[in-house]
Image: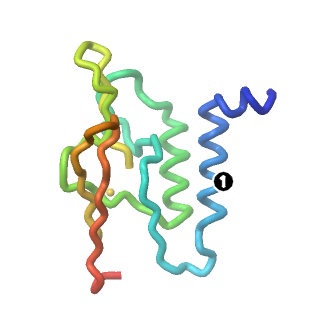
Amino acid sequence: MGRSSERKDPGHRRKLFLELLRSLTPKDHEAWCVVGDFNEILFQNEKIGSRQRAKTQLSQFQDALKENRLFDLGCCCDFFTWSNKHSDHSSTKERNVHESKGGGLSARCSNHTPILLSMDETSR
Protein backbone atom coordinates (compact mmCIF):
# COMPACT_ATOMS: atom_id res chain seq x y z
CA MET A 1 0.00 0.00 0.00
CA GLY A 2 1.39 3.41 -0.96
CA ARG A 3 1.57 6.45 1.31
CA SER A 4 -1.38 8.24 -0.32
CA SER A 5 -3.67 5.21 0.13
CA GLU A 6 -2.50 4.85 3.77
CA ARG A 7 -3.58 8.45 4.45
CA LYS A 8 -7.10 7.59 3.25
CA ASP A 9 -7.40 4.32 5.22
CA PRO A 10 -9.30 5.02 8.48
CA GLY A 11 -7.87 1.88 10.10
CA HIS A 12 -4.31 3.03 9.42
CA ARG A 13 -5.03 6.56 10.69
CA ARG A 14 -6.65 5.11 13.83
CA LYS A 15 -3.57 2.94 14.45
CA LEU A 16 -1.28 5.98 14.05
CA PHE A 17 -3.45 8.00 16.44
CA LEU A 18 -3.31 5.27 19.11
CA GLU A 19 0.48 5.01 18.70
CA LEU A 20 0.79 8.80 19.06
CA LEU A 21 -1.39 8.74 22.17
CA ARG A 22 0.83 6.05 23.72
CA SER A 23 3.97 8.04 22.92
CA LEU A 24 2.56 11.15 24.66
CA THR A 25 1.47 9.38 27.86
CA PRO A 26 3.60 10.56 30.82
CA LYS A 27 5.79 7.67 31.98
CA ASP A 28 5.94 8.65 35.67
CA HIS A 29 2.16 8.54 36.31
CA GLU A 30 1.75 12.30 36.53
CA ALA A 31 -1.74 13.66 35.84
CA TRP A 32 -2.58 14.62 32.30
CA CYS A 33 -5.60 15.58 30.26
CA VAL A 34 -6.42 15.06 26.59
CA VAL A 35 -9.47 16.89 25.25
CA GLY A 36 -10.86 16.67 21.78
CA ASP A 37 -13.00 14.77 19.37
CA PHE A 38 -11.37 11.45 18.58
CA ASN A 39 -14.14 10.45 16.15
CA GLU A 40 -14.55 7.31 18.24
CA ILE A 41 -17.18 5.93 20.57
CA LEU A 42 -16.74 3.63 23.57
CA PHE A 43 -20.05 1.76 23.36
CA GLN A 44 -22.66 1.06 20.66
CA ASN A 45 -25.34 3.04 22.57
CA GLU A 46 -23.32 6.22 21.94
CA LYS A 47 -24.47 6.21 18.31
CA ILE A 48 -27.83 6.48 16.57
CA GLY A 49 -28.21 5.77 12.87
CA SER A 50 -25.83 4.43 10.26
CA ARG A 51 -24.14 1.09 10.86
CA GLN A 52 -22.68 -0.03 14.17
CA ARG A 53 -18.97 0.13 14.87
CA ALA A 54 -17.00 -3.11 14.79
CA LYS A 55 -16.52 -4.62 18.25
CA THR A 56 -12.76 -4.72 17.66
CA GLN A 57 -12.75 -0.97 16.96
CA LEU A 58 -14.62 -0.30 20.22
CA SER A 59 -12.24 -2.60 22.13
CA GLN A 60 -9.14 -0.94 20.69
CA PHE A 61 -10.34 2.50 21.79
CA GLN A 62 -11.42 1.24 25.24
CA ASP A 63 -8.02 -0.44 25.69
CA ALA A 64 -6.16 2.69 24.56
CA LEU A 65 -7.97 4.79 27.18
CA LYS A 66 -7.18 2.26 29.93
CA GLU A 67 -3.53 1.87 28.89
CA ASN A 68 -3.03 5.64 28.84
CA ARG A 69 -4.86 6.31 32.13
CA LEU A 70 -7.61 8.31 30.41
CA PHE A 71 -11.36 8.22 30.96
CA ASP A 72 -14.46 9.79 29.55
CA LEU A 73 -15.40 12.91 31.56
CA GLY A 74 -19.08 12.66 30.83
CA CYS A 75 -21.15 15.52 29.59
CA CYS A 76 -23.64 17.82 31.25
CA CYS A 77 -25.37 18.76 28.02
CA ASP A 78 -26.89 16.98 25.04
CA PHE A 79 -25.77 13.34 25.04
CA PHE A 80 -24.72 13.45 21.38
CA THR A 81 -21.78 15.66 20.41
CA TRP A 82 -21.75 15.03 16.64
CA SER A 83 -24.44 14.95 13.97
CA ASN A 84 -24.32 14.61 10.21
CA LYS A 85 -27.22 17.14 10.22
CA HIS A 86 -29.35 15.02 7.89
CA SER A 87 -33.10 15.29 8.42
CA ASP A 88 -34.00 12.05 6.64
CA HIS A 89 -33.48 8.33 7.29
CA SER A 90 -29.70 8.74 6.96
CA SER A 91 -29.53 10.92 10.10
CA THR A 92 -26.64 9.87 12.34
CA LYS A 93 -25.67 11.13 15.78
CA GLU A 94 -22.74 10.08 17.95
CA ARG A 95 -21.44 10.83 21.40
CA ASN A 96 -17.71 11.17 20.89
CA VAL A 97 -15.75 10.74 23.87
CA HIS A 98 -16.88 10.88 30.29
CA GLU A 99 -14.15 15.12 38.51
CA SER A 100 -14.25 17.51 35.78
CA LYS A 101 -17.30 18.24 33.73
CA GLY A 102 -17.41 18.67 30.01
CA GLY A 103 -20.13 20.89 28.72
CA GLY A 104 -21.30 21.47 25.20
CA LEU A 105 -21.52 24.90 23.68
CA SER A 106 -23.55 25.90 20.62
CA ALA A 107 -22.24 24.61 17.32
CA ARG A 108 -22.73 27.39 14.81
CA CYS A 109 -20.48 26.41 11.91
CA SER A 110 -19.62 22.76 12.58
CA ASN A 111 -21.20 19.34 12.88
CA HIS A 112 -19.30 18.93 16.18
CA THR A 113 -20.43 20.42 19.49
CA PRO A 114 -17.62 22.53 21.00
CA ILE A 115 -16.67 21.23 24.45
CA LEU A 116 -15.93 23.46 27.42
CA LEU A 117 -13.82 21.80 30.14
CA SER A 118 -14.15 23.19 33.66
CA MET A 119 -11.82 21.97 36.40
CA ASP A 120 -11.95 22.54 40.14
CA GLU A 121 -8.46 23.46 41.34
CA THR A 122 -9.02 21.68 44.66
CA SER A 123 -9.66 18.26 43.09
CA ARG A 124 -6.74 16.47 41.49
Question: Residue 80: x, y in percent?
Answer: 26, 40
- Report the quarter where the N terminus lies: top right
**33 up-or-down from 57: above or below:** below
- Which residue extends farthest right? 2
Above or below 68: residue 27: below
For this rendering, which residue is in front, 82 or 56?
82
Quadrant of res 99: bottom left
Q: Quadrant of the C terminus?
A: bottom left
Could you tell me which residue is drawn at 34 percent across and 37 percent down? 110
Seen from the viewer's position, the closer of residues 110 and 33 is 110
Figure check: 118 above or below 74: below
Local secondary structure at mark 1: helix
Instruction: Identify which amino acid the numbered label 1 is placed on.
Output: Glu
The residue under label 1 is 19
Q: Is residue 60 left or right of residue 102?
A: right
Q: Is residue 113 left or right of residue 77?
A: right
Which residue sits at x=23%, y=51%? 105
Picture coordinates of residue 61 (x, y %)? 51, 48
Q: Residue at left 48%, top 41%?
A: 58
Q: Residue furthest front?
A: 109
Where does the image place residue 108, in percent across and percent down from the top left?
26, 39
In the displayed orientation, state which residue is furthest to the top.
89
Q: Quadrant of residue 76?
A: bottom left
Give the colour scheme shown: rainbow
